[in-house]
Image (cartoon, grey):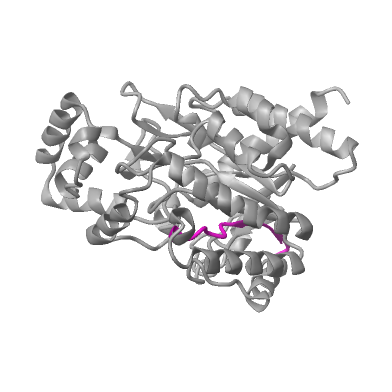
Amino acid sequence: MEQTWRWFGPHDKVSLSDARQAGAEGIVTALHDVPIGEIWSREAIEKRQQTVAAAGMRWSVVESLDVSERIKLREPGAQQDIDNYIESLRNLAACGIQVVAYNLMPVLTWMRTHLEWPLPSGATAPRFDATAFAAFDLYILRRQDAGEDWSECRSRAAHAFLHALSEKEREHLQATILQGLPGGSDSFSLEDLRRGIERYRHIDAAAMRSNAAEFLRRVCPVAQKLGIRLCVHPDDPPRALFGLPRIVSTADDLAFLLDQCAEESNGITFCTGALGVRADNSLVEMVQRFAHRIWFAHLRSTQREADPDSFFEAAHLEGDADLVAIVIELVKQERQRRSRGDLRALPFRSDHGQQLLNDADRHAQAGYPAIGRLRGLAELRGVQKAAERLLPH
């Protein structure tokens, strides 16, 4: 298995040197400055590769070559965006990059209500508080039909929660929820979010599945010829938010997407943190079922709280995800691939991380501290090495 590290480009407060010192062999990054739907040029890809190579590593995984909202909605312009996506894949393949992660989450990708929730250890972690989220949805965003999505008990608790906040705390909650991609610097306004939600008013989960299937049927055959493995990332968290359809939340969702194209270009980013939020997702069973199509792994653990709709980012070997058992299954799968002549290492990264020691002083992207991820990678490396040593050949 290849140890990788997510890096957000030259403006990332956690440097490539930090990543290499942490033990990373490969870098997971993207051309974040290229607008979604536009072509990634070969020149820009090569420039990023050269930067990573100069630091002693390689660009192993693209995360993410984003799917535009026009594609997800099959709006006018979707075909052009798909054509551009395919051209970007061609340019990546020409540069030797073979693993491309993407997601199908509508409007917003990840969702947290707190980015630095204090833990008993003195560390801080990202957290999703369902009552805080309901307060935003019902009383700050004032989304149409929001009342239909929340129970009377949750609505009352959300009202009480909001009125206990100071004006500054309300603003902070709003800014946290409106933040864009995890670790990114983009954010939305309330009006941006309202417009984004309105675009999906007549799109349910079945329609969005159909649109995703059309995308895969167009893109995967080309990716197969190019030798590229596409990896869909699960919804984070894996449930409907703001009344928007989410279609990568369960084993049935993953099976549906894989069924749209039988070629190995159609695969999964197996994110144990995102999928593990749902108690009905048995992660070990899922990794066993889908291991033959897992091309990239995000290894982290979340901890469900007494309120089962709320959770926080646990330490990597704690929480609800049994990462020891999962890493063992992934090591087994990699050995099986090698026995069939597939010598490509399975890339994984220690996803997210708690802020430890002086992590807060760096002001790194939310969820992506240096020391917290270093600890996670070191722990996972130990599990990997033990599994490789102890499993029978």
Residue 136 image point, x, y percent: 21, 44
Which is nearer the eye, 121 or 125? 125
Q: Magenta residues, as a range? A: 55-69
Residue 367 at x, y percent in the picture:
44, 48
- Quarter holding the N terminus is top right
Among all residues in the image, which is located at the extreme bottom?
Answer: 43
Quarter occupied by residue 59: bottom right
- Residue found at x 51% / y 25%: 281
Number of callouts: 0
Q: Is residue 49 left or right of residue 353?
A: right
Check if residue 188 falls in the magenta segment. no
Q: In this view, does 359 lie to the left or right of 325?
A: left
The one nearer the camera, 120 or 81, is 81
Q: In which quarter of the image is residue 80?
A: bottom right
State the residue at coordinates (36%, 30%): 120
Q: Is residue 283 left or right of residue 387?
A: left
Residue 16 higher or lower than 360, as above or below: below
Q: Looking at the image, which is closer to me, 303 or 89? A: 89
Residue 216 at x, y percent in the picture: 61, 51
Residue at figure coordinates x 57%, y 51% from the top left: 214
Q: Can residue 214 be seen in this view?
A: yes
Q: Residue at x 74, y 64 (%)?
A: 93
> Which quadrant of the figure contains the C terminus?
top right
Tell me which corner region of the image, top left, top right, bottom left or bottom right, holds residue 58.
bottom right
Asked if residue 355 can be seen in this view, the reply is: no
Query: For this view, does 70 lie left or right of residue 244?
Result: right
Comparing 209 with 191, the one in front is 209
Q: Position of residue 53 (x, y in %)?
A: 72, 67
